[in-house]
Image (tube, coloured by chain):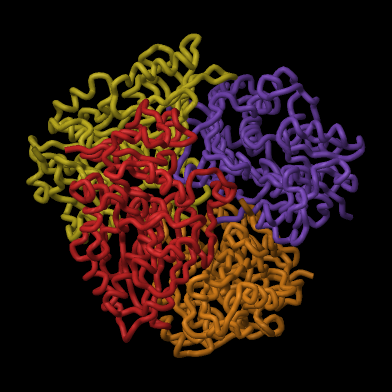
Chain colours: A orange, B purple, C yellow, D red
Amino acid sequence: MTFKVAVAGASGYAGGEVLRLLADHPQLDVVAAGAHSNAGEYITAVHPHLSAYGDRRFTPTAPEAFADADLVVMTLPHGQSAALAAQLPAGQKIVDLGADHRLENAAEWESYYAGPHAGTWTYGLPELPGQRERIAAADRVAATGCYAVATILALRPLLDAGIASPEDVVVVAASGTSGAGNAPKKNLLASEVSGSISAYKVGAHQHVPEIKQASGAASVSMTPLLAPMPRGILSTVTAKPAAEVTAADVRAALGKAYDGEHFVHVLREGQWPATASVFGTNAVQLQGTVDKDSGRIIVTAAIDNLGKGAAAQVVQCANLMLGLPEAAGLTVNGVAP
Amino acid sequence: MTFKVAVAGASGYAGGEVLRLLADHPQLDVVAAGAHSNAGEYITAVHPHLSAYGDRRFTPTAPEAFADADLVVMTLPHGQSAALAAQLPAGQKIVDLGADHRLENAAEWESYYAGPHAGTWTYGLPELPGQRERIAAADRVAATGCYAVATILALRPLLDAGIASPEDVVVVAASGTSGAGNAPKKNLLASEVSGSISAYKVGAHQHVPEIKQASGAASVSMTPLLAPMPRGILSTVTAKPAAEVTAADVRAALGKAYDGEHFVHVLREGQWPATASVFGTNAVQLQGTVDKDSGRIIVTAAIDNLGKGAAAQVVQCANLMLGLPEAAGLTVNGVAP
Amino acid sequence: MTFKVAVAGASGYAGGEVLRLLADHPQLDVVAAGAHSNAGEYITAVHPHLSAYGDRRFTPTAPEAFADADLVVMTLPHGQSAALAAQLPAGQKIVDLGADHRLENAAEWESYYAGPHAGTWTYGLPELPGQRERIAAADRVAATGCYAVATILALRPLLDAGIASPEDVVVVAASGTSGAGNAPKKNLLASEVSGSISAYKVGAHQHVPEIKQASGAASVSMTPLLAPMPRGILSTVTAKPAAEVTAADVRAALGKAYDGEHFVHVLREGQWPATASVFGTNAVQLQGTVDKDSGRIIVTAAIDNLGKGAAAQVVQCANLMLGLPEAAGLTVNGVAP
Amino acid sequence: MTFKVAVAGASGYAGGEVLRLLADHPQLDVVAAGAHSNAGEYITAVHPHLSAYGDRRFTPTAPEAFADADLVVMTLPHGQSAALAAQLPAGQKIVDLGADHRLENAAEWESYYAGPHAGTWTYGLPELPGQRERIAAADRVAATGCYAVATILALRPLLDAGIASPEDVVVVAASGTSGAGNAPKKNLLASEVSGSISAYKVGAHQHVPEIKQASGAASVSMTPLLAPMPRGILSTVTAKPAAEVTAADVRAALGKAYDGEHFVHVLREGQWPATASVFGTNAVQLQGTVDKDSGRIIVTAAIDNLGKGAAAQVVQCANLMLGLPEAAGLTVNGVAP
């Protein structure tokens, strides 16, 4: 059985990755690839790596272009997805990669984003307790932010196990450049980024409320870094121990939380996550320990920001919502080296 | 129907890529991943990106470890594959990614490689005229060298169409670092390669006789470049026009040669191949024109050196040899950006 | 004794590199850094690496801003430098990094550039025979194009020594991204370039007539490549031998041509140029051999496209024009790794 | 007036960078470049970017090779520098880039390093209060660790100003690959590092005691990251506020601490440090703010790990010890892009 999927925002990097995954998905077909300013152009003119699309062209990003679709994926700037969703029929399933419907607290939304809060949808992180079932039952799913995926999956087991304090969590997370999109900007030029690492939105990133909401953390300091690589997020999450805690306790908490999970891998002792290992996948790599000097718990998580951090996560949610095998069309094997 | 495949040389980059492709192949199963010095280790200790292999370990590279296999893939240094092949039963199918069995001319083999010539197997490039059928009928296939794939596919249509001279072909081809393998060497360190491009084996690369044999070229100058990227080959192939020739003639010759080919794509006019577009795939991108000043024909070809240049090509050949759909387990959609 | 220098086009990459070199130059002072759209901004807002400029700001790109200068450096898009030069007093020395005044043949200029030919200035490549003296005596110097520097210095000794034919020279030259400037374009984004190499302006690059003019070549095929690195050009130059020729002949011709030259280094046998080795310098690395199969002569040359290919070359010319030591403020030691 | 300098450990990356800086230093001459296994080889065989060294060769790393030197720089693995220093005459000045003589507390040394503590030398960070004078008066100086430079300079002003708590400082610092040296290792290959970021020595890095000693911090959690770039360290330092604190307070503390310092630059508001901006320099870039959610103070510091983090720092100390201008032979202008 196959289903029809439309992609709104298909000319961006996340949209392109959705198209890539769907091109090789055994049960999902792309019926429309919507793009505002690129409507009418060949898909391969914007995404020259998507050879399977041959002579297909972008459609407008408009409800009528998506009428056929069983499910609509929205990879649009925040604010735009709520507007589009409002025009789609109630029965049409939607996975929104934008931020519009992630937060439960309207005040937090307004504090980190511009404009009014559009309401809350089911949060698209299947590996959270009970969430897989909620997603499977939902018609509208708000996919998780890229930094949030990596950070929540690293942090929540520590809080659920009671070994970390929810106060004063410190996160430093490095992202590849594709997280910043494909609109041309000087600071994203290869000449500028190559050989350079720098921080941005320091102490004020909009994924913080989402991380707190989904992990149970009470306060989170976050510093995002732009790293000289096209893809990948490595989140370093540190938390104060709630009591005496060992590296083995940290590893046990992670292992217990993700026992049986197909996409989340707690590495063997001594191996640490690397973004190259999850390149192109829906996989998450985790490892943890305790700091020798301070006793802080340190967990690092690696994801592909366009994979589990965006498009692959969306496909995972779509699979659940459509009753397909959760891993259909997805891989855990990174394209490395 | 599924078949069993063993990989000899599975701890190298090409071997790892074979394992990656087979992990997600619908009809091929890995029954043994042989590695000399890593035998007994976890596969993920060497290839941390291959999460699907979980707790599986490398076997020795030994015939008895491969006894179960319907087909053996050999990704070994040249010289070693002939020795191993001699120990495998006659009926066991083999695809050899080493150079041992590619050349028909023993003198040429000895001129470019050390040691005696091991004999000639069916050449593993299905897109050459008539070759697909030969591979399907063969038990022993010698897969094509990475530079050779890109160069032959760019060059042969020009010679077959009679628009280029077979004399004085000039090739400059840039490769990512994975082509040099994963044995630690100072000149391959990230610190050395980052931001640097350089030539090596200038005018003396061992893929030249193979290129001549499979393309019909009479003389080929070749300069390989090491480029600061993990994967990809871009081969720039220039040839003297046999007669007055236009860019349209060049494009027509390429288009005719690969009409209907699933994996070889002649790009639209104005688009030029980029290695990122074929990252992780079995695809080949081609584009050609005529030089304004000299009249030389110029064609550039992009492949993934570990994909169509190695492991994906091997899987393509294996599919043909086992009667499976030629594209099973392979993609044309690059993992980009 | 110190001289005053103004830079027109100081907000671009080449202009920034001129500012960098002049900041640490013992005898040249920057009196104005002109920038059209950035006039009035802090220099460090555009060039955050130029800490020495502290609170200094860009001036307009206007003759009156440069009135004080003994010498004006112009790093402007072609067409604009001729217009500006026409407004500067006759006695004011100029080094123009643009293409406007490089070519002697107006027809060739018009064939490769838009608009009318602005006339010919002294060509700014001191290592050509007799050129050092001409530059020292000139008030107006047209600096050499980046690809042209590397290619001419590799090629001309072969023609001067009579060992190579001037017909059918084939050049494939890879450049780092800074050669394309800092105007934001999608194809120059880090996400697009990282891990990717591709060709552009294939067979139609505007540096070809310049290469022919300064080297004596009769026909040149040129394919420029965009490589995933911020700086550097590696030019692979191949030429047909005029007679029987050995690798030693090639090396001897190069060695003889550059004997005593401070900035041009013919490497020891077995060592090949790498762009990392000339990063940040005015140096040129050369090595040559003869192709085993075809007999073609192959020479590769490495430069820093912003160094000897642009700003350092400009400073070298300025030193000569102002009677300073030719190497003042310049280095041959690359910033590597 | 010029002085003679010998370098012990000149075949490594830090040693090579010392050679690079000294080659263009107006008052320091290299009299010996000592290298164990490379003794007798051309310096340019190991460091092909150091063209100025022409036909010079490495000497053994032996006291007699250094007898002429006014000052010896030691860039040796820890343990070896103490052994060598013991053989040098008491009057010969030494700057040791190894860790052997940095720590005051022998127990801390033994906890993080192997072997007995070799004693404590003057700490080579001139920007610490009073330290410039101590270095100028010293014969033996222990230069600062690379991560330590960036972290101490970011942290100490916060503690000195009383705005941050010395408890529970959290540091995540990303380094380029040259910090790991040029001994060939698989995990440092370009194929492995390209496009990948990962953590190592998590919570157990040997620079922690040094950071505490020189900054006054009471507890420090540190996570080092290996970033896909050849050079550069970006240290993200977060500390709990000692009282109510604003971003302006943080910036004021930094500004006050480094007022008049030539090499340390607190950036304008809104600009954040980037490693590319300090490439090849002795400069430090700093910026700070307060986290919106948690109130933590966040400061990021960028240095070149081979520059201010190693070789340039050594030259700065040598300048002070020899009575030369502190900035002689050093720059604040990064080689960018």
> Is B233 rendered above or below residue D247?
above
> Is A5 rendered above or below residue B35?
below
| Residue at x 66%, y 23% (from the top left corner) | B112
Apparent side of residue A165 relative to residue C178 in the rendered image (left or right): right
Identify which residue, B56 or C208, lies in the foreground. B56
Q: Quadrant of residue B86?
A: top right
Identify which residue, C77 or B281, lies in the foreground. B281
> Is A211 rendered above or below residue A236?
below
Residue A77 visible in the shown view: yes
Q: Quadrant of the N terminus of chain C?
A: top left
| Residue at x 62%, y 29% (from the top left corner) | B158
> Is B61 rendered above or below residue A114?
above
| Residue at x 18%, y 24% (from the top left corner) | C134
Apparent side of residue A77 relative to residue A29 in the rendered image (left or right): left
Apparent side of residue D335 relative to residue B126 in the rendered image (left or right): left
Apparent side of residue C197 relative to residue C33 in the rendered image (left or right): right
Q: Quadrant of residue A287?
A: bottom right
Q: Position of residue B118 (x, y in %)?
A: 79, 25
Identify which residue, D116 or B227, lies in the foreground. D116
Q: Quadrant of the C terminus of chain C?
A: top left
Q: Position of residue B207 (x, y in %)?
A: 64, 29
